[in-house]
Amino acid sequence: MPYPMIDPVAFELGPLAIRWYALAYIAGLLLGWWYVRRLAQVPPAVTTPERIDDFLVWATLGVVLGGRLGYVLVYNPAYYFAHPAEIAMVWQGGMAFHGGLAGVVVALLLFCRRHRIAPLALGDVIACAAPVGLFFGRLANFVNAELYGRPAPDLPWAMVFPTDPTGLPRHPSQLYEATLEGLVLFVILALLWRVRAVRLRRGSLIGVFLVGYGLARFTVEFAREPDPQLGYLFGGVTMGQILSLPMILAGLGFLVYAWTRPPQDPEQESP
């Protein structure tokens, strides 16, 4: 299947080039903010719309700083320590989801502490919106022809990516991830959110998100080409698979915690 040649630059404003990569992050954050704003008002309400507006800034900083630092420190530390000026060049790509997740968690904990919001209650809402950003982020990876899959010459929908020096047909693993981490996980969380008993079990949706993402990422890694500077690790596993295992375990921990405690209603607590 031919790779659709899409210019990574969406449009230009004079000397300023606006890339699809940046627009994908903006779209994910804005649509996620809109969705969180809606969910936070579903009884029992988690917090006010104004507080959600404030959290958008915190979440943006968490995603960008955490995602970039995660990539620099985990996936390519030697290069960036040798070229420190390029650490801030996020427009060139190089973001790690696990780092972005850590950044959002830190932002959420600090924000909830400042505004006296139950972290698990807000965390459940944020978890429901996270697949939106993942979906757009993976589409941006596809447009950039980066993070492509392993060679698959006999696969009918395999593609030759213009950034691949080997010229081999490969799995379009970015689209696999956009589907599993984005669309499928979004639908699962949206359906669970509609069940009031689930909403009252704080931490349930966080757990489902962590387990769902971890399983999806671990599975797709079998079709995704590992980062060239890391390659395959012990036993043929990849760094993405190693980082996904703690997420799955943490998600199971959240589910056990949520369903072994009595349900909690935020409307009965002071904001």
Image (spheres, grey):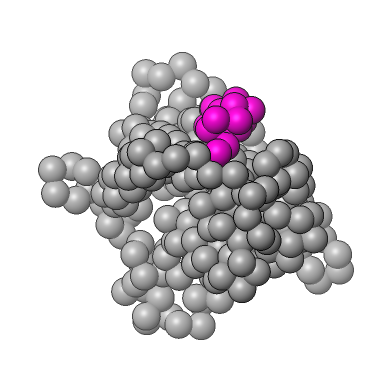
Farthest residue, direction right = 14
Relative to 12, residue 160 above or below = above
Q: Residue at x 44, y 40 (%)?
A: 262
Percent coordinates x, y for residue 167 in the rendering: 42, 38
Q: What's drawn in magenta, residue-wise?
A: 183-200
Residue furthest left in the image: 235
Residue 238 position, x and y percent, is: 27, 47
Q: Please say if 69 is above or below 218.
A: below
Q: Quadrant of the C terminus?
A: bottom right
- Residue 218 at what x, y percent from top left? 33, 38
202 sits to left or right of 23? left
The secondary structure that most of the magenta stretch takes on is helix
Horizontal side, residue 106 vs residue 155: left or right: right
Task: Tell me if residue 195 is in the magenta stretch.
Answer: yes
Residue 164 in magenta stretch: no
Say if 36 sits above or below 112 in the image.
above
Which quadrant is home to the N terminus? top right
Depth check: give the residue in front, 178 or 42: 42
Between 38 and 91, the one nearer to me in the picture: 38
- Residue drawn 57% across and 37% down? 199
Asked if residue 148 can be seen in this view, the reply is no
- Left or right: residue 55 versus residue 102 is right
Q: Which residue is drawn at 53% across and 58% down?
A: 119
Residue 110 picture location, percent across and down: 55, 71
> Residue drawn 67% across and 41% down?
44
